[in-house]
Image: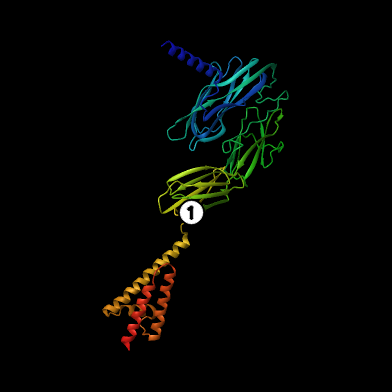
Amino acid sequence: MFFRQIKNIISAIILLIGTLLFPQFSHAADASLYISPSSVSTGIGGIFTVSVLLASNAQSANATSFVATFPNDKLEVTSVNKTGIISLWVQDPTFSNTAGTVSGEGVIFNPGYQGGGAKIMSITFRAKNSGSAKISFASGSILANDGSGTAIPTALGSSTITISSTTTPTTSTDLTNVAGTNGKPQLPTIFSDTHPDSEKWYRQNYAHFTWDMADEMTDVSAALDRSPTTRIGTQSIGRLQSFSSSDIGEDGIWYFHLRTKNILGWSNTAHFAFRVDSEPPSKLTISRVYEDTLINRARFNLEASDATSGIDKYLVTIDKKYSTELNGNITQTFETENLTGGIHTLTVRAFDKAGNYKEERIYFNIDGQQAPNTLTSIAQFLVIFMSLLAIITMLMYIFEKFTGHPMFSKAKHHALYGRKSISNAEAEHEMEKIKAMLERLNNLGHDTEETLKNFQKEIKKSKQKKK
């Protein structure tokens, strides 16, 4: 008993030490709510804006709710902007400088959002006192777009604000994103609900971008091209908070460029990369590998190519029942499990990294031979049809010989010449045609040698009777 207690105490101590030393080992979250940027430096009186972002890579998100906190002795909220991916705010974003909280609850309409990060809303703060302030989440949740509103494990991020004792100059209108002492706007932060992650490929051939516009902002200049370093000019397109392009053009990597202006001047150019691949893979081939060791199984080589984003994965389906997903490579080998005898269907879809796919289908059997294609099937039908026709012709001839009814002769005359009578030479010629047809059937695998011999004997008997 004493030793068992000692053992339990030692186990508890080991568990406690492991928990203290290795707290980072935990279940990974499938989604996250975080603050961007993750750090800000400003002075007393400085005004800055942060954004609340949602990321959900594992599955599509349908709704979110959160409560963000901040130290009210160092920061105060001046405004909130609910422009973002939320389709319907169940609870409009609200803030309390007394409690030091900002909260909101919203829904993203079907198909929801899935990606590396999209803006929910933005919050504008003013720094009150020097020191370090942390904006974080007291609570936050993300629900899946699965019809049931299943909770997705969610990680919560934060942002650290460093406030210097230097007073930041402002005009009678507060300047958002103050950069240095010149008062011009800082580099704007660009968001995209159509292409949220600059490192991922999307099949949408249209794009939509948003950014924050504080009250003192007066103008925007924007451009879209293929260069990552374009420095756009100061030609204003108005006081806009979004930009859309309904048709990007050719696939590839594109860049959206943006500058904003306040009463003191223009910001530098911000760049946002986005990737478009609207076309399916250009090639997908399936070839069967024949090996004697394959019994009741089949092996196939798969090869696909996509010039823009590349091949991401293959989805292989057998008989519309069993599906297997293979990681993306230009070439892959797939081997079936044991299958029952007969013809089977292999369907392959090759997906590129934007989600486009190309599909091919072949038929195969398990005895090591390729199943007949369309032309082969037509040939087999013709062989069966000709065989049945020959059998019917033979039965009609035999029926005539045994019954005396001129069924065969009349049918042949009507089919070939209508109701005209024919000579013995012509009849002989027609018999030779039938003989040739039966010989061709013999070449297709039908054993007609004995039938031909009996047929010839009957022809000789018929000639002798006529004489």
> Residue 245 at x, y = what percent?
61, 42
Q: Quadrant for the C terminus, please.
A: bottom left
Which element carries disc 1, helix, strand or loop?
Answer: strand
Determine which residue is flagged by label 1: 362
- Judged from this view, the residue extending furthest toward the top is 2
> Residue 295 at x, y = what percent?
45, 50
Q: Quadrant for the N terminus, please.
A: top left
Horizontal side of residue 445 vs 206, given as left or right: left
Between 62 and 467, the one nearer to me in the picture: 467
Horizontal side of residue 315 vs 388, given as left or right: right
> Residue 71 at x, y = what percent?
58, 16
> Residue 118 at x, y = what percent?
56, 32
Quarter occupied by residue 68: top right
Q: Please, what is the three-letter code of the amino acid marked with disc 1?
A: Ile
Task: Name the residue rendered at 44%, 31% in the picture.
Answer: 150
Disc 1 residue crowd, few under 14, some 14–19, many 20+, Cα 10 Å: some
Tally the marks: 1
Horizontal side of residue 16 vs 147, given as left or right: right
Between 54 and 45, the one nearer to me in the picture: 54
Task: Name the residue rendered at 64%, 41% in the picture.
Answer: 254
Image color mode: rainbow
Between 245 and 199, the one nearer to me in the picture: 199
Horizontal side of residue 436 vs 210, given as left or right: left
- Judged from this view, the residue extending furthest toward the right is 182
